[in-house]
Image (cartoon, helix red, strand yellow):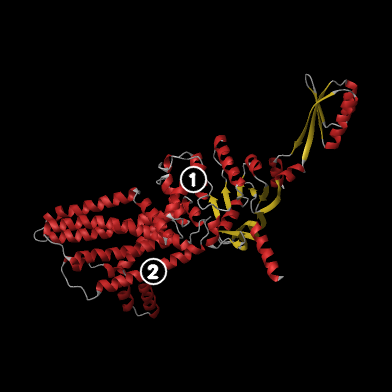
């Protein structure tokens, strides 16, 4: 029985890819001044999940990342990756990391650069060559292996950064602001790579404030404000719950019929060949649709307007 | 071990692409070569001048390379945040630091070998032979450079490059004068001054232990086992410096 319990807890531990318990960091600035950058973060991310970690600049996103990756020591609390304390060096064999605005050694060629990191993972020379070719192909840099990094564009560097993060075929990948400073094409390329990784069942932890991109790739998001987690949830349920309004377009109704709709709608707008009514919720929308059919008008469109991630984000940040 | 080696080679690669290194090396070679000209101004002492200037150049420029290239390398990794990506890999912090140190030592070794090559060629050309003692003197200079590099590395784990350079050069100077510290302290009548100077004497590196330039140039006999004892002292002192550097680096937050 005891053994079974142990096995069960091991399995459940294996399911959690990233976990933080009361993770806290206080920076000392000067002699007496202290800044609490992270106020006891509790977070659980399951294996295979794509998690967007959002927050305005200075909210503590990078601090969280650095604590999890062992770049800083927490004031209190702990972080676990795949059930192991994240400070143990061995755990990092399972981690991939793309730092923000990666400066890489500009005097190296892409090939030298990747083989340097492969040695840090103890990948044997034989399999390293093959792995590097695979990775360059994955990120669309095939044939660029012998170019020095100083000749790379920002988007190419970012893709190379992803290649090095995947060197060890990690189970958990951390991306810090992967979209910053990229043009729309560059962003799409990165998004495609992320979706590919997602298909392969990788756990992806995203720090970002480009919300539209996060909305497209992430399953779940957390919003961090001033070192505190203000909201966590699945993107669809966060958005679903918050229907802002419904827009109904119709035509073929006389003034009398329109008067029936006016008290229900929050706004009505006559356009050339149609009328637009904005109603606050689904129930009001049903009513309007009934009136249109009773009065023998024709319904052109019905559009639910949901809150975007950006609206939720702004609301949480404003408190 | 492979990880330390990877960091060492990467450090070496970065160092040999640094412009400061070539400027310093060029100057050193010019001065070593220039000693021939200066030597012609003296009568009968030409060989001594050449040896004196050659050994001094290797020592001084070696030190400058150790300090300026050494300090920049660790600081640059932190400043440009490339270190984030190394610490986030399965690499112990001590492996990073040892790798950096060995990369610098390799850089110094190559530079000292180049300077030595030019120097010994000139000596051979003028003298017709090269005495083993000269090589012994250069070996001890290299031991000294190992300590200076470790000092530079230690400071660069917790302070800025400018301060590191000032501190390291200050310790270099103190290290060459530390015997005076002991002599001065022994003359004092105050007990605490005697204790303090004695403490500082043992704390600071005694870099004169590696200076046999004068004796070699003037053909004086060295005390028995001098080179061996100095080397052991150098290795021990370097080891302690690296341990302290690792202890500080281990605690450090990369903000």
Instruction: Give the CA separation, mark 2 to mark 1.
Output: 42 Å
Q: Along the horizontal axis of the image, is B158 left or right of A200?
A: left
Residue A134 shows which numbered tag? 1
Viewer-closest of B43 and A163? A163
Judging by the rendered image, the residue that carries numbered circle 2 is: B239
The chain letter under disc 2 is B
Residue B240 sits above or below residue B70 on the image: below
Residue A195 sits above or below residue B227 on the image: above
The answer to whether one can see residue B53 in this image is yes
The chain letter under disc 1 is A
* Residue count near mark 2 (Cα–Cα under 10 Å), binned few <14, some 14–19, many ≥20: some
Q: Residue at x 89, y 25 (%)?
A: A259
Disc 2 or disc 1, which is closer to the eye? 1
The percent coordinates of residue B209 (x first, y second) are 28, 70
Q: Along the horizontal axis of the image, is B130 left or right of A274?
A: left
Q: Residue at x 54, y 40 (%)?
A: A181
Quadrant location of residue B141?
bottom left
The percent coordinates of residue B81 (x first, y second) are 49, 51
* Residue count near mark 1 (Cα–Cα under 10 Å), binned few <14, some 14–19, many ≥20: some
Q: Residue at x 36, y 71 (%)?
A: B236
Q: Along the horizontal axis of the image, is B53 left or right of A65?
A: left
């Amino acid at each position: 029985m005891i053994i079974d319990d142990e096995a069960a807890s091991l399995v459940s531990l294996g399911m959690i890819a990233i976990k933080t318990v009361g993770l806290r960091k206080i920076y000392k600035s000067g002699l007496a001044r202290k800044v609490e950058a992270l106020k006891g973060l509790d977070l659980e991310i399951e294996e295979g999940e794509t998690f967007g970690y959002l927050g305005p600049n200075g909210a503590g996103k990078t601090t969280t990342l650095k604590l999890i990756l062992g770049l800083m020591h927490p004031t209190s609390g702990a972080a676990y990756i795949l059930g192991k304390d994240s400070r143990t060096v061995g755990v990092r064999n399972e981690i991939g990391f793309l730092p923000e605005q990666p400066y890489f050694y500009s005097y190296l060629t892409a090939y030298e650069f990747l083989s340097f990191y492969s040695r840090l993972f103890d990948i044997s020379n034989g399999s390293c060559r093959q792995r590097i070719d695979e990775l360059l192909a994955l990120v669309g840099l095939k044939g660029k292996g012998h170019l020095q990094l100083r000749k790379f564009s920002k988007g190419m560097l970012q893709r190379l950064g992803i290649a090095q993060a995947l060197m060890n075929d990690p189970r958990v990948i951390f991306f810090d602001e992967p979209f910053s400073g990229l043009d729309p094409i560059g962003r799409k390329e990165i998004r495609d790579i992320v979706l590919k990784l997602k298909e392969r069942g990788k756990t992806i932890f995203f720090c970002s404030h480009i919300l539209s991109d996060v909305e497209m790739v992430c399953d779940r998001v957390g919003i961090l404000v001033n070192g505190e987690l203000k909201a966590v949830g699945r993107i669809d349920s966060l958005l679903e719950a918050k229907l802002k309004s419904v827009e109904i377009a119709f035509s073929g109704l006389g003034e009398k019929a329109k008067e029936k709709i006016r008290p229900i709608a929050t706004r009505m707008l006559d356009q050339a060949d149609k009328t637009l009514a904005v109603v606050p919720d689904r129930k009001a929308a049903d009513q309007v649709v009934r009136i249109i059919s009773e009065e023998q008008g024709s319904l052109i469109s019905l559009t639910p307007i949901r809150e975007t991630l950006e609206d939720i984000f702004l609301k949480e940040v404003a408190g | 071990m492979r990880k330390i080696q990877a960091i060492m080679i990467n450090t070496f690669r970065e160092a040999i692409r640094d412009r400061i290194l070539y400027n310093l090396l060029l100057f050193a070679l010019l001065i070593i070569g220039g000693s021939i000209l200066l030597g012609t101004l003296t009568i009968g002492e030409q060989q001594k001048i050449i040896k004196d200037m050659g050994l001094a150049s290797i020592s001084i420029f070696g030190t400058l390379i150790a300090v300026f290239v050494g300090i920049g390398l660790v600081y640059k990794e932190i400043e440009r945040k490339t270190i984030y990506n190394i610490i986030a890999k399965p690499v112990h912090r001590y492996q990073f630091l040892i790798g950096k140190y060995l990369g610098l030592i390799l850089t110094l070794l190559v530079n000292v070998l180049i300077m030595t090559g030019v120097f010994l060629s000139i000596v051979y050309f003028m003298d017709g032979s090269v005495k083993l003692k000269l090589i012994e003197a250069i070996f001890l200079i290299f031991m000294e450079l190992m300590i200076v590099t470790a000092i530079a590395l230690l400071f660069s784990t917790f302070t800025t490059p400018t301060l590191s350079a000032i501190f390291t050069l200050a310790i270099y100077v103190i290290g060459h004068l530390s015997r005076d510290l002991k002599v001065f302290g022994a003359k004092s009548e105050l007990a605490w001054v005697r204790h303090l100077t004695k403490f500082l004497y043992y704390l600071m590196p005694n870099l004169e232990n590696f200076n046999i330039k004068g004796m070699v140039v003037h053909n004086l006999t060295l005390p028995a086992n001098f080179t061996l004892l100095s080397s052991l002292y150098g290795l021990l002192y370097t080891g302690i410096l690296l341990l302290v550097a690792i202890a500080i680096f281990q605690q450090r937050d990369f903000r």
